[in-house]
Amino acid sequence: MLQQFLTSQIFAFLLVFCRLGSAFVLLPGFGEIYVAVRARLMLALMFSLTLTPVVHNIPPVPTDAFALMTLMGGEILTGLFLGGLSRLLIAAMHIAATAIAYQSSLASALTLDIAQFQGQDTSLGNLMSVTAVVLLFATDLDHLMLKGLADSYTLFVPGQFPPIADFAQSATQTMNGAFRMALQLAAPNIVIGMILYLGGGIISRLMPTMQIFFIMMAPQLLISFFIIMVTFSAIMLWYINYFKDSLSVFLAP
């Protein structure tokens, strides 16, 4: 009896870790490239150890290896889905910052991308993405992400293969919402940029020999920095509310 109890408890812990560990790979703030892999692994192990006793719908230990691999694969896929949706939400700020950088002639100011996984990004994109992650922890939305992972066991019962079609539809809707939110966040800079380029195009047609787009770069940067200064707080507050509302879908009533 003791051996059976220990086997079932170890199996339950490993099954919970499959979902939470795969989610921690992609969760904003926890899965960033500047977070040490060992620290991320320890967080996932401790959270799995804490959550295992309160998860009551763990299936029995499979009798064959194929059933075990299928069960673990379904849990890993569910964890990647939950972490990927959170990553799509944080990508909305990255898309908005990139749009602002292109409209304000800051797209060529490239630095190492510290907010995503690899490559380069604009300096403004790094600033706004890192600020968004800091605000997630400052406003305790990291607790909401962890609660969403805990409540996912009422939405996606272990032992049942994940609904792939629902996952794809939810990911598509989340991506559409992220692009829509990104355009709304960057709307002031996009509108002002279009007005400036329209005025520059009219002046260029009236005076073809004048290098108008070179001349207007300095005023464009000045105006863009002023718009960012005025709207930065509102952009962040609006984004935090959007992130909170999007995560609330996965919380149990």
Image (cartoon, rainbow, N blue to C red):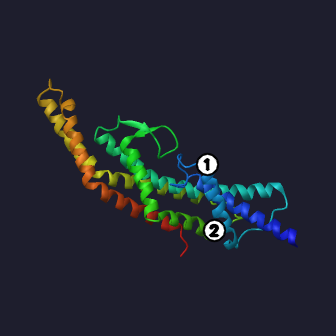
Q: Is residue 49 above or below residue 104?
A: below
- Can residue 164 be seen here? The reply is no
Residue 74, labelled with which disc? Answer: none
Q: Residues within 10 Å of mark 1 (few under 14, many from 20)?
A: some
For marks 2 and 1, give the CA distance. Answer: 25 Å
Q: Secondary structure at mark 2?
A: helix
* Front residue of this view, candidates 84 and 198: 84
Amino acid at circle 2 = Tyr
Q: Is residue 104 left or right of residue 96?
A: left
Query: Which residue sits at x=38%, y=47%?
Result: 127
Q: Tell us which disc is closer to us: 2 or 1.
A: 1
Q: Secondary structure at mark 1?
A: helix
Where residue 43 appears, as percent x and y from the top left, is 61, 58
Q: Residue at label 2?
A: 153
Where residue 226 appears, as percent x and y from the top left, is 23, 48
Q: Is residue 200 above or below residue 31?
A: above
Residue that protrudes farthest toward the left in the picture: 206
Where residue 252 appears, as percent x and y from the top left, is 55, 73
Q: Is residue 144 left or right of residue 177?
A: right
Could you say which quadrant of the image residue 45 lies in? bottom right
Query: Which residue sits at x=37%, y=41%?
Result: 123
Could you say which quadrant of the image residue 212 lies in? top left
Q: Residue at label 1?
A: 37
Amino acid at circle 1 = Val
Q: Residues within 10 Å of mark 2 (few under 14, many from 20)?
A: some
Residue that protrudes farthest toward the top in the picture: 209
